[in-house]
Amino acid sequence: MTKILAIANQKGGVGKTTTSVNLAASLAACEKRVLLVDLDPQGNATMGSGTNKQALKTTVYHVLLGEAAIPQARIGSEQGKYDLIPANRDLAGAEVEMVEFAQRESRLKTALAEIQGDYDYVLIDCPPSLNLLTLNGLCAAHAVMIPMQCEYYALEGLSDLVNTIKRVRAGFNPTLRIEGLLRTMFDPRNILAQQVSDQLQKHFGEKVYRTVIPRNVRLAEAPGFGLPVLCHDAQSKGAQAYLDLAKEVLNA
């Protein structure tokens, strides 16, 4: 059975796209069939997968509007060994255009239903806001992974996201659950980061992944080459952390 995982946090700069791209590559390295859906108009997951977003003719925008099916839009990430439904700036207009559609919150879910048997994992890189695109991601997903930095404001944003997930569960997707909280860009020398990490573990217990993603130069460099970090420097701490995360996801 295909497992659909939304990677979401309304706060920007917490490592959603980094996690989406590198978890996709790491699961593929574990010989799983993986589809990454870029649901962010910035198209960073598309570029980080080695695709020129400006040259695309068919994207997730066309899928959401019903102008293309997923097999028509998907492309392969040669380096990452996974499939991708790409995005570019066109996606920014999808929200306005979908307003008149019936069941506009489940357009992605309907599209993904057609390819359920093709993949072991579908990862959805959600935009950094709680909008109709994110709602589509949450309605399509079985579970949510929440990447977050261990800082004060992250805790405040987390409570908003948890409430949103509860509302989505109540109104649209009763089986949606929080898969786990992922600590990203973690610096163990930072006392505040340690304190916030301790609070997360105290309040969320087993919902906090054991794997911690460190601050890592190779991890930061990789998108500039259009590569997952595993293809950029497989021995780096960042690459090894995402491989550990993939193993944790596989054992969940």
Image (cartoon, rainbow, N blue to C red):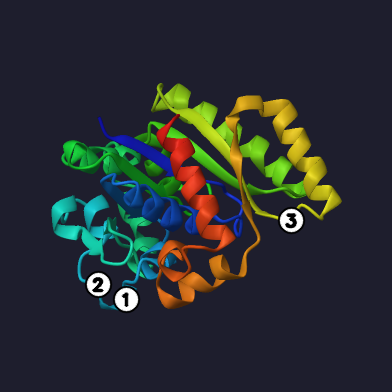
Residue drawn 67% across the image and 35% down it: 159
The 10 Å Cα crowd at callout 2, few under 14, some 14 to 19, many 20 or more, is few
The image quarter containing residue 40 is bottom left
Q: Which mark is residue 128?
A: none
Q: Nearer the viewer, residue 49 or 217?
A: 217
Q: How far is the residue under mark 1 from the one under mark 3?
A: 33 Å
Q: How far is the residue under mark 3 from the one under mark 2?
A: 38 Å
Q: Amino acid at mark 2?
A: Leu
The image quarter containing residue 84 is bottom left
Residue drawn 39% across the image and 48% down it: 124
In the rendered image of this protein, does residue 164 appear above or below residue 212? Answer: above
The 10 Å Cα crowd at callout 3, few under 14, some 14 to 19, many 20 or more, is some
Q: Secondary structure at mark 2?
A: loop
Q: Nearer the viewer, residue 105 or 152?
A: 152
**Dot 3 corresponds to which residue?**
187
Residue drawn 53% across the image and 27% down it: 166
Q: Nearer the viewer, mark 3 or mark 2?
A: 3
Q: Nearer the viewer, mark 1 or mark 3?
A: 3
Please say if the residues under marks 1 and 2 sit with CB atoms less than 8 Å apart: yes
- Residue 135 appears in view: no
The 10 Å Cα crowd at callout 1, few under 14, some 14 to 19, many 20 or more, is some
**Dot 2 corresponds to which residue?**
56
- Residue 111 appears in view: yes
First in residue order: circle 1 vs circle 3: 1
**Dot 1 corresponds to which residue?**
52
